[in-house]
Image: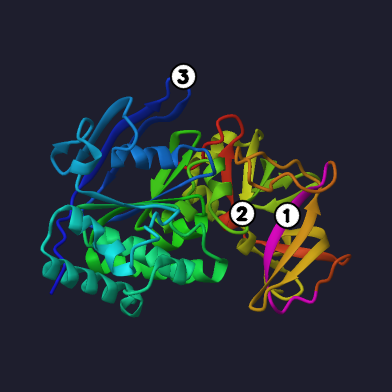
Amino acid sequence: MRLRVDMADVRLDKITKVYPNGFQAVTELSLELSDGEFLVLVGPSGCGKSTALRMIAGLEEISGGDLYVGDRHMNDVAAKDRDIAMVFQSYALYPQMSVADNIGFPLRLRKIPKAERRKKVEHAAKILEITEQLDKKPSNLSGGQRQRVAMGRAIVREPSLFLMDEPLSNLDAKLRVQMRADIAGIQRDLGVTTFYVTHDQVEAMTMGDRVAVIKDGYLQQVASPEALYAEPDNVFVAAFIGSPHMNLYEGMVVEQGDGLVVCLGDQRLALDSRVLDHRPALRAHIDQPVVVGIRPEDMDDAAVVTDHPADQRLDAEVDVREALGAETLMHFGLAVPSVNSGDPDALDELGAENQSRCTARFSAETGARPGDRIRVNVTTAKMHFFDRSSHLAIRS
């Protein structure tokens, strides 16, 4: 037996939500999901992502804009008639019912015959690897098993669209890693169009076909995880996506001889000539303040990697060392102003006055310890630059 799944395109055309008190939670959000796509909406707490999901589900009224599922205009369609299944953060299971009855409850409401209902429940349980739990009550299950039951209840409905609202946030760290892979694999096997909301950028980057970043109700960028990481459109996305996050500083690009250098406080880094090939608009920002971004993995210990150009190194004193086995995170201060990304959770203004924290991802071979004066290689070909006023990426 195979579950029937009718996939659907989904289109949000300038969706807006304004509450009676005047608070605007979502502003003209436009997104398109293709058949079978897994799209993740990510952003900090209170940014409007769950509100957007609830508007799609029909649990919140749409104040402006249009929602389409397939060719059907959905703004005024009741939630129960939308052919949408939603998985909540809280599981929302019936404690008095068995796992089998919880999974089969939507089919029972549709008056599906008992024998057919049982087949669908057993098939969903097999997909989710909870067949042995069918006769148990939710109170006898682990958090991960309860979440699988909640997913099973969505799967048996055979909807055209899955909505998932922070489904892993109640699980411990180890279980979240396992469930991330499981949910992504199940969605891929079923091929159901899925809209997934999370505040966890690691979840977003590891699960989504595409990732949409939202801040204060406004869409910041939507792209594949790889494109989002490699080419953030603005300072907020640059700081929000990545763990550890991108180091962001005030700097200036100036001419020196036949090339360009990046000034970070009293230190200078020769700019790789390939940067201008990739970011020609940077020429218009020479001798002007810009935001300079450096990913932690684009730095390493010069004592270990000795063939790096000498004019692309920073002097630093190690503050904190975090040995993680395969790599070592090194924290040190730079005498250069850091930049506020606009993310209240971003730790981009640490350290003493006039000393901005920098995090580098060194190879495990580094022997540097707190208090050591070291030289740090910087791969300037991979540096990011943003307009100081607009915070938008400087590219072409």
| In the image: residue 39, left or right of residue 311 | left
The disc placed on residue 261 is none
Q: Which residues are magenta?
A: 354-367
- Amino acid at pointer 2: His
Q: Earlier in the sequence, mark 3 or mark 2?
A: 3
Front residue of 196 and 81: 81
Spot occupied by residue 224 in the image (x, y as percentages of width and height): 38, 55
Crowding at dot 3, Cα within 10 Å, few <14 / some 14-19 / many 20+, comes out as: few
Name the residue located 12 percent from the left edge and 60 percent from the top edge: 112
Front residue of 217 and 58: 58
SS category of the residue bearing label 2: loop
Estimate the spatial distance between the alpha carbons at disc 1 and disc 2, rounded to whole Å. Answer: 10 Å
Front residue of 233 and 66: 66
Spot occupied by residue 302 in the image (x, y as percentages of width and height): 74, 70
| In the image: residue 212, left or right of residue 9 | right
Q: Quadrant of the N terminus?
A: bottom left
Name the residue located 60 percent from the left edge and 29 percent from the top edge: 389
Q: Earlier in the sequence, mark 1 or mark 2?
A: 2
Can you see residue 258? Answer: no
| Location of mark 2 (residue) | 245
Residue furthest to the right in view is 371
| Location of mark 1 (residue) | 358
Q: Nearer the viewer, mark 3 or mark 2?
A: 3
- Does 99 sit above or below residue 56? below
- Amino acid at pointer 3: Gly
Crowding at dot 1, Cα within 10 Å, few <14 / some 14-19 / many 20+, comes out as: many
- Amino acid at pointer 1: Cys
